[in-house]
Image (cartoon, rainbow, N blue to C red):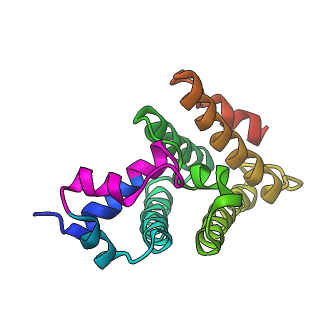
């Protein structure tokens, strides 16, 4: 199935955002990559902010599907956390920064709409992680006094940070399974 122009623009721009950053790419870059005129890009996305928001919205939809897949595939906390870490590792090994981590690095320079959706994405991840950690407590996999929200924040912070360190050092093992043990013990 042939990919449409809008989807090709979103995919190409996501790649640029995850390798160069939001501020560092332009419609001229996209025009060259896709092989269309800048005016055609503006037809689909009148502003760069609208393009950025469309990218994050589609990314959030994919992540929600992945979260559901993880929950359907893995019945235990360890399996769910391993799958979550694996998603970060796959992105890192593919030479990409986490999308919203890359955006968060530029937060002060982002248009307000992108700031809002970036914050929403992090909140969504934290809620999901907290939920699966709470299920781990309910299932007896974690102690009753386990602080799920704090541990979710810690896990997400470690994975985002490890992704950036991997990006800078090119050490593909920066995101390891040992991260989970740090969190749940």
Q: Residue at x 61, y 36 (%)?
A: 164
Q: Could you tell me residue 112's position as x and y percent?
A: 65, 73
First to last magenta residue range: 15-36
Q: Does any portion of residue 124 appear in the rendered image?
A: yes
Q: Could you tell me residue 148's position as x and y percent?
A: 79, 57
Q: Residue at x 68, y 49 (%)?
A: 156
Q: Could you tell me residue 181's position as x and y percent?
A: 71, 34
Q: Left or right: 151 with respect to 126?
A: right
Q: Relative to residue 176, is residue 98 depicted above or below?
A: below
Q: Residue at x 49, y 52 (%)?
A: 74
The quadrant of the image that shows the N terminus is bottom left
Q: Left or right: 48 with respect to 146?
A: left
Q: Nearer the viewer, residue 84 or 3?
A: 3
The quadrant of the image that shows the C terminus is top right
Q: Nearer the viewer, residue 41 or 3?
A: 41
Q: Nearer the viewer, residue 90 or 185?
A: 90
Q: Could you tell me residue 66's position as x and y percent?
A: 44, 59
Q: Does any portion of residue 132 appear in the rendered image?
A: no
User: Residue placed farthest to the right in the image?
Assistant: 145
User: Residue placed farthest to the left in the image?
Assistant: 1
Magenta highlight on residue 25: yes
Q: Left or right: 64 with respect to 12?
A: right
Q: Relative to residue 78, is residue 128 depicted above or below?
A: below
Magenta highlight on residue 75: no
Count of numbered badges drawn on the protein: 0
Q: Quadrant of residue 162?
A: top right
Q: Residue at x 66, y 59 (%)?
A: 109
């Amino acid at each position: 199935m042939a990919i449409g122009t809008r989807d090709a623009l979103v995919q190409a721009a996501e790649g640029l955002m995850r390798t160069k950053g939001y501020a560092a790419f332009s419609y001229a870059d996209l025009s060259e990559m896709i092989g269309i005129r800048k005016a055609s890009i503006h037809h689909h996305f009148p502003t760069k902010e609208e393009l950025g928001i469309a990218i994050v919205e589609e990314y959030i939809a994919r992540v929600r599907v992945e979260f559901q897949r993880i929950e359907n595939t893995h019945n235990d906390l360890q399996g769910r956390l391993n799958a979550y870490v694996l998603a970060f590792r796959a992105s890192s090994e593919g030479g990409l920064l986490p999308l919203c981590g890359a955006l968060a690095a530029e937060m002060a320079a982002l248009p307000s709409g992108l700031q809002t959706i970036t914050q929403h994405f992090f909140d969504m991840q934290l809620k999901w992680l907290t939920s699966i950690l709470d299920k781990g407590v309910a299932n007896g996999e974690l102690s009753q006094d386990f602080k799920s929200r704090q541990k979710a924040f810690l896990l997400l912070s470690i994975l985002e940070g490890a992704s950036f360190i991997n990006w800078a050092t090119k050490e593909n093992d920066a995101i390891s399974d040992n991260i989970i043990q740090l969190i749940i013990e």
